[in-house]
Image: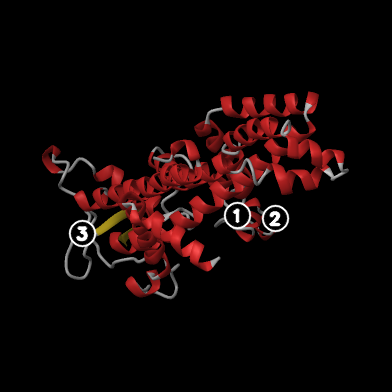
Amino acid sequence: MTSQITLALYRFLSNWRNFLTVYLICCFVGIALAAPWISPPIDPLQPPNIKLVQSYERDPLPPSDDIPLGTAPYYAPPDMLFHYDVLHSLIWGTRDALRFGLIVALTAACVGVLIGAASATIGGLFNMLMMRITDAFLAFPVIAGVWLFEQMMEHINYNGAYAGVDMVSATQPSLHRFLSVIGLDGVMLALICFSWMPYARLINAEVLKLKQAEFIMAAKATGVRPIHIIFKHLLPNSITPAIVLVARDIGGMVVLQAALAFIGIGGDVVYQGTAEWARLLLLGRTWIIGVGGNVLSYWWLYVPVTLTLILFGISWNMLGDRLNVMLNPRERP
């Protein structure tokens, strides 16, 4: 068994596209794991993913020996000025990106797979109703969904949760605190709620075809329980498209999160739950056009994070393509 796995891994990595894909993903995972050693935090009072540079300049500080990729300033009226270390945010943002992509993609996949498999197994009117609900979610814009969740979170959490409130309102239950305990935030929850539908559609179509297979009919004839048929026979034989889609969605969700934050949805500069890559985009968008209209005056604010997002998204998309080639016999050369 071990020799077979080794041989399959060797064959997979012998293709230069597969090797490049695995290399890129391993680089991101390695940076995320080694972040405390690559760029250690210097202020124990600050979260480890935030490194502030002392400066009274309102303009971004250019790269130097102490700050290899410069700083991104944030001015909060009336007299608060912060400079975020760009390199530190890029390194620690890898952790945020992997955590965000994995949680959103895997949770949405689990929800969609269970809904699609259960509705196809039951069939009839129930399956038709569930697929119409799935179509309704597919027709709803994701941006509108994220905005709706943000407004709901703001209404619940910020109604007396910050400075200047009385102790009664400050001790009220907070949805934000609850989501933090279970490892989610508003953007995660919104994207999960509006990302499960493709998985449900894929699995539903595959299970509907497999239901008529002879081995499924034989299992039903011998009295096997429906739940056992789903997890023992139907899902293992129909899960391949969902695996490919998960790999692609991990990178896609991170890019979508950053894009939403860039246009002002689902992100806040001073909010501790904001992902570092999204924070850099938020801070850098006001400095894209420099003095005299030169777009490269403050290149360190948006070029490194943009290239990082592109590489992150491409690596996971490549993994999805390579898994599709490996798992789908029709795609094999």
Q: Secondary structure at mark 1?
A: loop
Q: Residue shown at 63%/25% (left/top)?
A: 136
What residue occupies the far right of the structure in this picture?
223
Q: Secondary structure at mark 2?
A: loop
Q: Residue shown at 27%/48% (left/top)?
A: 302
Q: Is residue 77 visible?
A: no
Image location (x, y in percent) of residue 287:
24, 45
Foreground label between 3 and 2: 3
Q: Label 3 neighbourhood size at 10 Å, few (<14), some (14-19), many (20+)?
A: many
Image location (x, y in percent) of residue 118:
74, 38
Q: Which residue is mark 1?
A: 161
- Return the disc, 1 or 3, that comes first in the chain's sequence: 3
- Return the disc, 3 or 2, that comes first in the chain's sequence: 3
- Side (left or right) of 241 relative to 67: right
Residue 232 or 174: which is nearer the viewer?
A: 232
Q: Which residue is mark 3?
A: 61
Residue 319 or 256: which is nearer the viewer?
A: 319
Query: Where 301 sits versus 126, above or below?
Result: below
Q: Secondary structure at mark 3?
A: loop
Image location (x, y in percent) of residue 232:
73, 49
- Return the disc, 2 or 1, that comes first in the chain's sequence: 1
Mark 2 belongs to which amino acid? Gln
Q: Is residue 190 visible?
A: yes
Q: Which residue is mark 2?
A: 172
Distance, label 1 to label 3, CA atoms, is: 34 Å
Q: Are marks 2 and 1 in contact (CB under 8 Å)?
A: yes
Mark 1 belongs to which amino acid? Ala
Q: Which quadrant: the C terminus?
A: top left
Distance, label 3 to label 2, CA atoms, is: 41 Å
